[in-house]
Amino acid sequence: MIEFLHPWALAGLTCAAIPVLLHLLARREPPTVEFPAVRYLIATTQEHLHRLKLQNLLLLAVRTLLIIAIILAAAGPTVARSGLPNHAPGALALIVDNSPSSGVVLGGSPRLASLQNAARAVLARATPDDAVWLITADGIPRRGDADALRSRLDALPVSSYRLDLGSALGVAIGALSTDPRPGEVVLLSDLQASAVSPADVTVPLIVGRPDDPTVANVGIGRLETGPQPWSTDGGRITVSLVGDSVRAAPVSARLGERPARQALASGGTAVFPPITAPAGWWSATAELDPDEFRLDDRRLGAVRVAPVARVNWDSASRYVAAACEVLESNHRIVRGNEITVGRLAPRGSIVMPPADPAGIGALNRALAARGVTWSFGAPVASPAATDSGALTGRFRVRRRYALESSGSGRTGVLATVGGSPWLARSGNVLLIGSRLDPEWTDLPVSAGFMPFMDALLNRLARGEVAISEGTPGDPVALPDLVTSVRQGEREWKVEGGGLFRPHDVGIYFLVAGEDTIGAVSANLDPRESRLGRATDVQVRQLWKGARIMPVDRAGPAAFSAGVRGDLRGPLLWLALALGLTEMVLASAVRRRSP
Amino acid sequence: MPASSLSSGRVRLDLLDPVEVSKLGGIEVTTQGVVEGFLAGLHRSPRRGFSAEFAEHRMYQPGDDVRHVDWKILGRNDRLYVKQFEEETNLRAMVVCDASRSMAWTGSPGTVLPKLAYAQRLIAALSLILLRQRDATGLITFDDDIRTVLPPRVRLSHWRQLLETLGSLEAGQGTAAEPALRRVVQQLRRRGLVVFVSDLLLDRALALKALRFLRHRGHQVIVLHLMDPAEAALAGPAEARFEDPETGAAVVLRPRDWAGAYRETVRSVVAEWRLACRRHGIAYHHITTDTPYGMVLRGALSTASRAA
């Protein structure tokens, strides 16, 4: 296949019309000469007309071809030398897309197997003089000799990591840039449309993709467990389907190893009736009937079941009291002394600044005496908005006290306003920088107030944090207090406030000391369920110059893109030959003119 | 310079460039000069020609037909003499002159006479010679129709009438040779001489048919094919539209590209005419209009002598 280094130069091909245009423009009306022997002229021309026409046409063709040859040479055509047994030393980055979608089983074997076979064919063409990198769904370029990479390839599983192909190309090109040899990228992928993203392709790129039709797939895209924690009265599970053809499908859901419940997901969503369970941390599992793509037929979620908080609130605080009464009527809290709202109490407390500024000093002293590492600082009158977060969302804060930490760093910050702590925890005491009153903040009159109060009383005041979701390989921000992450028997020591990358699908519990304070449910990216393939046209638009071919032909084509034959030389020789031909022909025409 | 002095002096008008000759005076004067020059070349013996009756010998002069060299004298004395014969006066001649528009053309005005002007002087000279030989001479002119018919007369004064007719001759439009040639039959009841003067830019088949007819009637036929030098060798601007003044036919070409082929075509046309005429016993002379009259007359009259 011919490609051009400077395709814009092809616009010059219009110059090929110059000989014809010159011929047409030169056809002006000549002067008339009276000549009685015109019959002799006519006889002469008729005799030689055919030969002259042929000669002129030949000259025209040679001149046109000469221009075309020069323009083509300027465009820098190159041709692949595929199939050559030997090739010049080159650098090759081999991207094997073992993302979850490569686990689609077709004809009894996963898609990944065909990609691996093609990758082996690529490695088979590698010589010791070549530099080869292998990049898989984890996005790490691994350099090695062909044998080492072949071993790694043989052991390559279907990964839970989603592979963004544009990013992977960027990594590959970056790796190649460190090597002086001609670079080339071979990408072997199912070319899932959602994974194809723009990339600045500066080296020859071979894209091997399956040429069989894609299969329609349905998977579980979302598993919602509602407000946490569940009370002992239970909670609801909602399952949403995703895929190429979302249709009604039976879905089952269960908590831990408890018996599964069945529901029909009509319209792509299945809502299960309340499921009850004893207090504790549970893993919720939703499952679909198996299809060609098994990995997205199962999805996990974390559920915390706990008795509702026993709360003591001050009826003088109008909005807090109203919210607590609503929560009580909905069985999300009961009256008791486990948590006190509005003032510092011996047990769990949610402390807000006093209405009288004169009381701040006494409150801070009491907090310090209690061992709380946070205190109220100077009042801040400039209005600001809370920074968006899972807990609070964004709402306006008119007045607040700066929260000051006497401990190390900002440990315990749960929400901020303009980057400054607004909600912080120390032990079983929560400090809010503003009073929950419309004069201080819009929160009490916003729709998010009830969920905020629910989370505040049932989770945050108990030392628990949110249950979050993530995907394998993508970083999840850890709460401040987390000291380790556990999954089954495995445990990773972590630093609170840092990042954690779930390595696979599963429930990861966040532990602070000996207490489990939260969980991260890691599931496949829902986009993996859409198996629709990007078209060749789309791929070429995003990756300029990509050579797209069936995956089984990518192996023989490897190490050829980097050593493409340059046709400029032959074309210039051709132009020279045509120029000489033109000179000879033109002079011969003149010499042998009738 | 008077033509008489020219003719009687050392200069022979019949061997001069026709244009130079035409500058010396009118047709009558110049033609007389030409004829005098021509006859002087024939040993000043206007009453001797190349007829059948032997008269005497004279020294060979350049231009004489080698067929008349007396080889016996050459063998005995190692000297070149030609035989001269007594004239006969029973020859009746008709000159048929093409006066079509193409005959009025010259490729080099001022340096080459138009074909018609050349033909006028040539016919005048020829007529004068014939009349002096006491051959009855007539004239038919034509273009796209027969214009004038002068029956053959033997009186020398008839030459004046011929001159008037020739002098008043102007080029017409087309060329219709066949009727004119057939008209000759009415004028020549007995076997005679027909001189056809034309540029032969006409319907060749018809013309040949008429000429064959004349031969069939027993006439000796001479075709004087006049051609301007510019017709023999193509020249002109880099590219031109060449248009036939008679038919309006035109062709656009670059003369430089076609000159060679055109020359070949002309050569071929001349050869075809020559061959076709020879095949039917017709004398054919290809004459470019820069040829001195004397040379043309010699060729024509040698043919005429065979017809006498």
Image (cartoon, grey):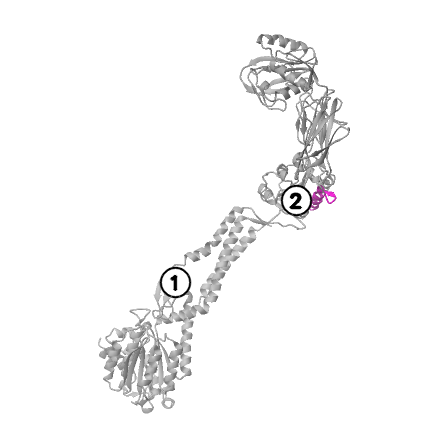
Q: How crowded is mark 2: few (under 14 residues within 10 Å), some or many (20 or more)?
A: many
The image quadrant of residue A348 is top right
- The residue type indicated by label 2 comes to Arg
Q: Which mark is residue A279?
A: none
- The reply to whether residue A99 is visible in this rendering is no
Which of the two residues, A19 or A452, is positioned nearer the viewer here? A452
Which of the two residues, B143 or A445, is positioned nearer the viewer here? A445
- Residue drawn where x is 61% and y is 20% of the image: A449
Which residue is denoted by mark 1 in the rendering?
A: B239
Cα–Cα span, label 2 and label 1 = 64 Å
Which of the two residues, B76 or A220, is positioned nearer the viewer here? A220
- The residue type indicated by label 1 comes to Glu
Residue extent of the magenta highlight: A106-131
Rendering coords of residue A530 (x, y %) = 65, 38
Residue A123 belongs to magenta span: yes
The image quadrant of residue A322 is top right
Which residue is denoted by mark 2 in the rendering?
A: A209
The quadrant the C terminus of chain A occupies is bottom left
A556 in relation to A143, above or below: below
B262 in relation to B95, above or below: above
- The reply to whether residue B221 is visible in this rendering is yes
